[in-house]
Every structure is written in structure tokens, then in C-alpha cells.
Image: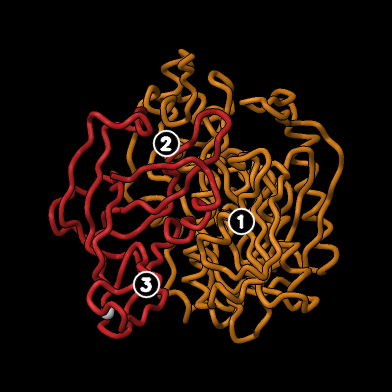
Chain colours: A orange, B red
Amino acid sequence: MLMAGIVGYGAYIPIYRIKVEEIAKIWSEDAEAIKHGLGIIEKSVPGRDEDAATIAVEAARRAIKHSGINSGAIGAIYVGSESHPYAVKPTATVVKEAIQANDRMMAADLEFACKAGTAGIQMAMGLVDSGIIKYGMAAGSDTSQGRPGDALEYTASAGGAAFIIGKEKAETIADIIKTVSFTTDTPDFWRREGASFPTHSGRFTGEPGYFRHVTSATKMLLEDTGFKPSDFSYAVFHQPNGKFPRNVAKMLGFTEEQIAPGLMTPIIGNTYSGSSIIGLAATLDVAKPGDRILLTSFGSGAGSDSFAIEVTENIDAKRAKLVKVRDIADAHKKYIDYSTYLKNRNTIKKR
Amino acid sequence: MITMEKPSASLWRKIKPRYNLSGNICKNCSTAYFPPRIVCRKCGRNSKMESMTFSGNGEIISFTEIRVPPDTFRDEAPYTVGVVKLDEGPLVEGHILENGIKIDIGTKVKAAFRKMYVDGEEGPIYYHYKFEPV
Ligand SMILES: [Zn+2]
């Protein structure tokens, strides 16, 4: 059994929202059909002054506050994103400075489409479990872009979460019992250097991409731990839209009730590297000591990381310092029209 | 007015105060400063300066909406800048975020972390605190 667990977490979602109707209007598409097909009603949009680094910082600051630890004790920071602000220059160093962590520190940026955040959690776990560092921070943060007119434009959104991993029994709010990954070379979705928007292999990528990887990783985890779906109070699956996680839960034998607290995509969109871990944060927001949570991420390209997590007694005592995900999602929400959306996303070419 | 300089080693030294509102305090008279000062204005040679990171909490004491911005912020207008009195004492200039809360003199704010300025297509990205009404 692993010793590493979650010591604190935080999430951040920009205040701007655009409704499916507003995007559908521009492309003369049927909003009701899209809402039904994708299981989403609106998505978050970053402000003009927000990017994957500012989102990671805001989430990381909340995680530090929630954890109650001194940021100087963090030994590693990994930031996962597919929209790092720089092609060359780490986001993790910005986060490190903005939370006033110590210069004696390991840091790196990760990219694995939508699962770079959970990959960071695994890396931090290894360093914590081995005793190389006391605490590690893993963040997943994105301001993902969908090509105007593409189906992804309805879902690609902005947000992130940060988790602090440690192993002191008095500090962990949830222990990570087991993690396992399933990885193959599957070019279902990509963005080449210099390209503004990602390309995907069309609408039939779900089976060989999302469903194959999520089910394989989850089944491996269940086999390794001996747990059945009913042994978990909650489950969180990567949420590229509102439909896929519901379908995959059903395929694997999980119920609607188990995935409900963590299903955030219908109201905030797909936050990519933030998606499954914002779902985990929203689930931890309501979990009680003793609850087990299953988490399986998915990143195109492709892979899935699956985790069995058990909530500890410490969770209630730390709640006072927590800003809950659903409160973040509701706070100061501001609806914007399509032209403001284009301006916020810097999609308008001036020359 | 907040100005943006070209990247240089002197600019790197400003990253800490810009990210975290870190200034200093004179332990002799308890006056806090932002940006940090080498010598206390009141105590002179008796200054006992110690670095200090401010909470980022404060209240607006003046503000104005910028409609005709400098070139640096050309695409951002209209936006609001203001002077915030931090809980620890110092007065700090900064951009004030729009989040639906109507602002006035006395409105409470907290520091947020945002992109301030992006230097063209190839230059660096400047991150900075901004104030968010609460
Ligand atoms: Zn003094």
C-alpha cells in the first residue's frame, strides 16, 4: 500500500461563460441538439488577462491555504497543461514564485493532453513515497482552444486545480491507495508546434481513444485492488463533454449517483488538464471520512491514469479553509457574447 | 501609472513584489512599505527594515476608469485602475478587476494573480497582482 495522500487542494474557474446557444447562433446550428448531444449547457472562458499560468497560480494558492502547510516546505511543482503560455519557458516556475516556495525545489511542466494533471500527481506521489521530498504540488490548468466552427468550440474551456501531495498521517485528507496507467500511441487528437488550434481525427475517436483507455485503466485498477464499483462512494472520469463520463460509468458498472458530484463539464466545459481533477476536487468537497473515490483521467495521444482514493478523518477539520468547486463555478458568473469571446481568446487578427 | 520596462536583470528582481505584494516593514516604528524601501522614511539611520509579504487585502481609496489607455494597454480599455490601502498600511496602485461587484471608495479588495502585459508576438509575458473586489 502506498503512503502518499492529498494534503490540500484548490481549484480555479474564470468568471466568464458562454452559452451553447450563443455559439450555435453564429454557425446556424441547432443549440438544443448540441446541448443534448454533448450534455453541456455552457462553458467557462478565460479573461484577457488569464492564461494557464494565472489559473494554476490561483488554484495553487487555494491549495496552500486549504492544506495549512508552509509553501516553503514544497519540494516539487509539476504543472500539466496543453496551453502553457510559453513554448519554451516553464509555467511551474511562475507558480513556484507566486506561492513563495523555496528556491530549493524540483519543477517541470508536463503535457499529456487532458491528463497532464494526474500525471503530475503520480510523479509527486513517487517523490513523496520515496522520501525524496516532503510535499509535492501537481497542478493541471488550461485555456484550451477549439477551432471556430469546430465541435470542440462548444466544450473547450478554461480552469484548473492543484493538489498538494504528502504522507503525514495527521495531514492527509485522502490517501491514495493505488494508481495505475494505461498508455498507447494513439493519434486521436494533437496540436503541432505553432498551430493555434488542435486537430482531431473526427467524431469517431471516442471508441479507440477515450473509451478504450478509460475502461482499460479502470479495470486494471479494480483488478489490482480487488475493489468492485460498489466499493466506491464516488467515481470521477475525464469529462471531455457531459456524455462520455456518463456512458463510461455505465459501461464499467458505476451509477449516476456515484459520478454526480464530480461531473462539472455540463456547466463549465472541458477544462482539459483541469477536467478530471476539478471533478475530483468537487467530489472531495462533499466526501466523508471513509468514502472511497475512483478517479480515471484520459489524455489523447493516449493514456489514462486511474486512482483509488480513500478519504480520511482529517477532511472535516480542514473544510473551514476550503473554497468549494461549485461555489467557485457560481461566483460572479458573467455571460459574454460571441464577439467578446473572440476578443478574450485573442482570436481576432489585427494584421 | 504602472509602467512596463523591457526585460532585464533589474526587472527580474521586481518579480517577487509584483507576484506577491512583498515589501518591507521598519521594526523600529512599524511602518510598512510597498515597494520595499532601503531606509525607513521616518527613522532614517535608525531604520530596522525587514521583508514582509502583505496579505493582499485592502480597500479602494480612489479609482478611475481608463478609456484612453497608454499603448501598452491599448486593447484592454476600458479598465479600472485605483489606489488601494492595504490592511498593513501601504498605499498601492493597481488594476482593479471587473467581477460584477460595483466598486466605490471603501470597497474591500483582495489581490489576484493576472497577466499584466504581453510584449508583442515574441516578447515575455508580465505577470502581476491585480485587485479583485470582494
Ligand atoms: Zn521606521
**Residue A59 against residue A291 in the figure, above or below:** above
Labels 3, 1: front one: 3
Which residue in the structure is indicated by mark 1? A93
Labels 2, 3: front one: 3
Which residue in the structure is indicated by mark 2? A48
Residue shown at the point (61%, 78%) measured from the top left? A172
Find numbered disc 2 in the image and state the secondary structure of the residue it sits on.
loop
In depth, the one of A50 and A331 nearer the eye is: A50
Give the quadrant of residue B46.
bottom left
**Residue A83 against residue A80 in the figure, above or below:** above
Where residue A213 appears, as percent x and y from the top left, is 79, 45
Distance between the alpha carbons at the discs numbered 3 and 1: 23 Å
Residue B46 can be seen, yes or no: yes
Residue shown at the point (57%, 36%) measured from the top left? A144
Which residue in the structure is indicated by mark 3? B24
Q: Are marks 2 and 3 on the same chain?
A: no
Distance between the alpha carbons at the discs numbered 2 and 1: 21 Å
In depth, the one of A280 and A103 nearer the eye is: A103
Residue A58 can be seen, yes or no: no
Quadrant location, the N terminus of chain A: bottom right
Which label's residue is closer to the chain start, 2 or 1? 2
Amino acid residing under circle 3: Asn
Give the quadrant of residue A312.
bottom right
Neighbour tally class for label 1: few under 14, some 14-19, many 20 plus, Cα within 10 Å: many
Distance between the alpha carbons at the discs numbered 2 and 3: 31 Å
Residue at the front extreme?
Answer: B45
Where residue A59 appears, as percent x and y from the top left, is 50, 58
Where residue A245 appears, as percent x and y from the top left, is 63, 45
Residue shown at the point (44%, 39%) measured from the top left? B117
Amino acid residing under circle 1: Thr
